Image (spheres, grey):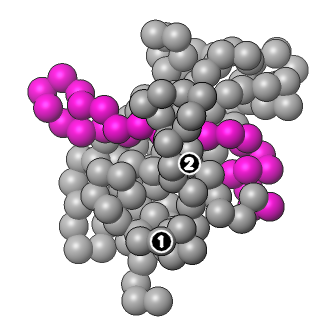
Amino acid sequence: MSESETGFVHEPAADHPGWHSWDMADNTRFNAQAMGRLLVREETLPGGMRSVRLRMFPERRHSNLLDAVHGGVTLALIDISLFSGIRLILGADAAGSVTLDLSTQFIGAGRIGEPLDAISEVLRETRRLVFVRGTIEQDGHLVASYHGTVRKPSGR
């Protein structure tokens, strides 16, 4: 799929070897405006299951009054990670899909100034749905766990 079809710019990140950009083709949209730069890479989990790691770079604008990453920012990263996961693992149409449900368990606080990663794996795909689970990690520390359901697009 071309950039205009997917809505994303996905190309090697010259300053982060092994990573690719995960940017909106239209930088006036939520991801670019609220989240800033996002990077992505595919990984293999123990046992051979494929996963996708989506990375953001938390700044002061992402903080709450405790100087930690705001929970809403963490939830946004999780939601975006559902779509990067299904796009890269399954080749599914992430731009035309929608989140049906998202369950998150906050376990720790994310810190400002250190990369924050969402690691997603696809548990199951049906004709219309994709079931995803994952974790939010920062420098080896667990920040949150999640699972969500994404509905694939109907004919456009």
Task: Indicate the amino acid at tag 2.
Answer: Trp
The residue positioned 82% from the left and 15% from the top of the image is 66
Image location (x, y in percent) of residue 70: 74, 29
The magenta segment: 28-53
Q: Which residue bears the numbered disc 1?
A: 2
Please name whichever residue, 144 or 34, is drawn nearer the observer in this view of the structure. Answer: 34
| Amino acid found under the numbered disc labelled 1 | Ser
Q: Secondary structure at mark 1?
A: loop
> Image quarter for residue 26?
bottom right
Q: Is residue 32 magenta?
A: yes
Residue 95, percent across and down? 51, 68
Residue 22 disc label? 2
Asked if the stretch drawn in magenta spans residue 82, the answer is no
| In front of the other: 50 or 65 | 50
Residue occupying the point 47% across, 89% down: 156
State whether residue 43 appears in this view: yes
Taking 53 as reference, is 56 left or right?
Answer: right
Question: How many residues crowd mark 2 within 10 Å: few (<14), some (14–19), many (20+)?
Answer: many
Q: Is residue 133 left or right of residue 25?
A: left
Residue 8, position in %: x, y?
Answer: 56, 60
Contact, mark 1 vs mark 2 (Cβ under 8 Å) = no
Q: Quadrant of residue 153?
A: bottom left
Structural distance between the alpha carbons of marks 1 and 2: 14 Å
Farthest-out residue, left: 47
Residue drawn at x 23%, y 74% is 127
**Judging from the image, what secondary structure is the residue with disc 2 in?**
loop
Q: Nearer the viewer, mark 1 or mark 2?
A: 1
Where residue 42 sits: x, y (%)? 35, 38
Q: Mark 1, residues whose alpha carbon is within 10 Å: few (<14), some, or many (≥20)?
A: few
The outermost residue toward the bottom is 156
